[in-house]
């Protein structure tokens, strides 16, 4: 068994810089990952374009392959100028702050490629063309940008219960952001959900401006409707011997408001429906598999205060008639029955069944069956209100502890391995015990050697890994010598780790029961 103890502190990873395989040629344009020669260039000067010499003019594509232009000689050249054109909404200062290339610095094609990606990351640019023009003593760079429409202004009309600042923050829109129809519709949905959360179930949001092409001003018209508060929460139809209103109130999230409008009690119909599901789950966990819960909301004369009534139909409570076990060989049914908190002829309880399931798994873990799984199967009888429970046991194989790996991570991992191993309750060769592993993990977490706060780092954790085992028969044509302890029985197969020598002991050692006078556990030889 591979046992890993890890204490990981959060670290900041630096992304690798992408290096393009080809350099930009002189007098070239880059658009969406392809490089094309330009027909006309102004060579970095203002005014009308000059005709490029015939050797560099654009030629139509032919069937013959074009020879790639080598522009590696541009790297290292001095950048004489950087210009932007085509921008209407973004200022040149903002564009310059986005890129890393600067004048009077050496030209770097990889850095230029990163500049293009940075321009795209702003979300305000849909296309970029880069023109590199070689001059006598350097390189001139020109960025031609094609911008997306941006939001010029954002307004809300009709909102009285929630301020503009909160609505703008919830919508995720602000002046200067890229204008997108999807983001506007998503903002409408978020604003409506916010109003319903604060007790405005009849709210309606309309887009007066901003949903048509060419409109850069966004205007939301809010029809709030009446604000509703919960005046009272009532439960009808529950058995007083089983539960009480205080217990049911602790299950749901709907709560009555105070006498003022400031704190709590906002009516949320979606939350009320979720409370119905919570009450149904509560009753079914107690054995009321046919329980039904309805809800009724009644407003007062003002229409602002709502009475919420949960109408409960419990139905029949199911009783356990029998409990059985299947697949268990290490323990008898009588041994496992002593672990049960459930009893026959008593009402079903899901919480108690889960406790019994963990108890069976835990007792198997003390015998080396650390990968044992228990699956309860609930079977309803034809008689109403009666059921049987069958615990299906998949024991697996017992294991011993193999190699223990200690992995310490963080900014300053100086803790010695012995410090960790001395706090463990197991050693290589011991029978694997799940309880000891859990206690060792708790001991490491409370040792104050590592960060136990998940926000500061990953707490110490014991990870159990089972290697990929395969069964290998003896390769020799001659029969192997009989085992003195296992004379007269089939020779146990050798378990090895795939890809390693069969003679090497694996990290997790499976065990097999040998029949002898003492009925002891012995590892494979």
Image (tube, rainbow, N blue to C red):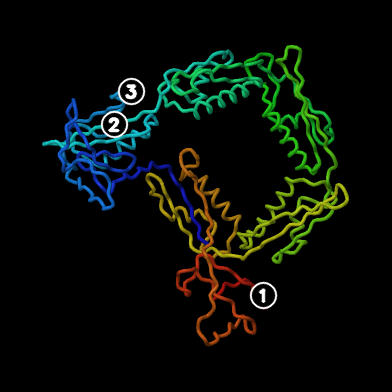
Camera-near label (1 vs 2) is 2
Residue hosting label 1: 518
Depth check, front residue: 423 or 403: 403
Q: What residue is shown at x 78% (from left), y 59% (from top)?
A: 324
Res 351 → quadrant: top right
Q: Which mark is residue 88?
A: 3
Q: Where, quadrant-wise, is the C terminus in this rendering?
A: bottom right
Q: Is residue 86 above or below residue 460?
A: above
Instruction: Give the structural element (helix, strand or loop) at label 2.
Output: strand
Residue 104 seen: no
**How many numbered discs, if any?**
3
- Residue 497 visible to the viewer: yes
Judged from the image, the secondary structure of the residue bearing numbered disc 1 is loop
Residue ranking furthest to the left: 136
Asked if residue 414 lies left or right of residue 359, the reply is left
Marks 3/1 in contact by CB < 8 Å: the verdict is: no
Pointer 1 or 2: first along the chain: 2
Give the residue displayed 32% in from the left and 34% down from the top. 128
Residue depicted at 49% across the width and 23% down the height: 212
Residue at 54% x, 63% y is 401
Mark 2 or mark 3: name the one nearer the start of the chain: 3
Q: Position of residue 353 (x, y in %)?
A: 74, 49
The CA span between labels 2 and 3 is: 11 Å
Mark 2: give few (<14), some (14-19) or many (20+) Cα within 10 Å. Answer: some
Residue 364 in picture, x, y percent from top left: 66, 60
Q: Which residue is mark 2?
A: 144
- Image vertical order of residue 156 relative to residue 491, above or below: above
Element type at mark 3:
loop
Q: Nearer the viewer, mark 3 or mark 1?
A: 3
In-front residue for pair 364/102: 102
Numbered circle sitting on residue 470: none
């Amino acid at each position: 068994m591979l046992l890993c103890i890890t204490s990981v502190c959060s670290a900041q990873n630096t992304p690798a810089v992408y290096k393009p395989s080809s350099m930009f040629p002189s007098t070239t344009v880059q658009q969406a990952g392809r490089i094309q020669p330009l027909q006309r260039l102004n060579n970095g000067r203002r005014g009308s374009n000059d005709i490029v010499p015939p050797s560099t003019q654009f030629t139509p594509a032919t069937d013959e392959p074009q020879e790639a232009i080598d522009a590696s000689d541009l790297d290292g050249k001095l950048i004489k100028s950087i210009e932007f054109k085509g921008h209407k909404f973004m200022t040149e200062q903002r564009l310059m702050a986005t890129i890393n290339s600067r004048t009077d610095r050496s030209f770097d094609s990889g850095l230029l490629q990163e500049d293009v990606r940075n321009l795209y990351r702003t979300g305000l640019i849909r296309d970029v063309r880069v023109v590199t023009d070689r001059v006598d003593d350097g390189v001139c760079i020109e960025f031609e940008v094609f911008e997306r429409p941006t939001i010029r202004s954002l307004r809300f009309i009709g909102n009285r219960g929630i301020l503009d600042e909160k609505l703008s923050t919830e919508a995720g829109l602000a002046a200067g952001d890229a204008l997108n129809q999807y983001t506007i519709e998503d903002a409408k949905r978020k604003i409506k959900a916010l109003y319903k959360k604060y007790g405005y179930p009849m709210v309606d949001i309309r887009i007066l401006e901003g949903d048509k092409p060419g409109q850069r001003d966004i205007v939301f018209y809010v029809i709030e409707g009446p604000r509703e508060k919960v005046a009272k929460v009532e439960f009808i139809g529950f058995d007083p011997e089983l539960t009480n209103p205080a217990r049911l109130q602790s299950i749901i999230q709907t709560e009555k408001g105070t006498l003022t409008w400031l704190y709590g009690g906002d009516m949320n119909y979606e939350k009320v429906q979720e409370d119905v599901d919570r009450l149904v789950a509560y009753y079914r966990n107690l054995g009321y598999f046919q329980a039904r819960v309805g809800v009724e909301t009644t407003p007062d004369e003002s229409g602002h205060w709502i009475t919420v009534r949960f109408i409960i139909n419990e139905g029949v409570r199911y009783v356990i008639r029998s409990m059985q076990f299947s697949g268990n060989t290490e323990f008898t049914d009588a041994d496992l029955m002593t672990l049960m908190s459930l009893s026959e002829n008593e009402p079903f309880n899901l919480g108690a069944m889960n406790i019994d399931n963990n108890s069976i798994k835990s007792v198997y873990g003390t015998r080396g069956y650390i990968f044992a799984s228990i699956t309860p199967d609930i079977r309803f009888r034809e008689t109403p209100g009666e059921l049987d429970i069958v615990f299906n046991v998949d024991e697996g194989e017992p294991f011993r502890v193999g190699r223990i790996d200690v992995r310490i991570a963080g900014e300053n991992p100086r803790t010695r391995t012995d410090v960790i191993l001395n706090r463990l309750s197991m050693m290589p060769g011991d029978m694997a015990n799940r309880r000891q592993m859990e206690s060792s993990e708790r001991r490491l977490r409370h040792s104050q050697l590592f960060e136990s706060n998940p926000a500061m780092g990953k707490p110490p954790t014991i990870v159990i890994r089972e290697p990929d085992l395969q069964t290998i028969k003896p390769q020799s044509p001659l029969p192997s010598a009989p085992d003195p302890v296992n004379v007269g029985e089939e020779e146990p197969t050798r378990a090895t780790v795939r890809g390693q020598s069969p003679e090497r002991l694996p990290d997790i050692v499976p065990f097999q029961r040998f029949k002898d006078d003492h009925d002891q556990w012995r590892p494979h030889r």
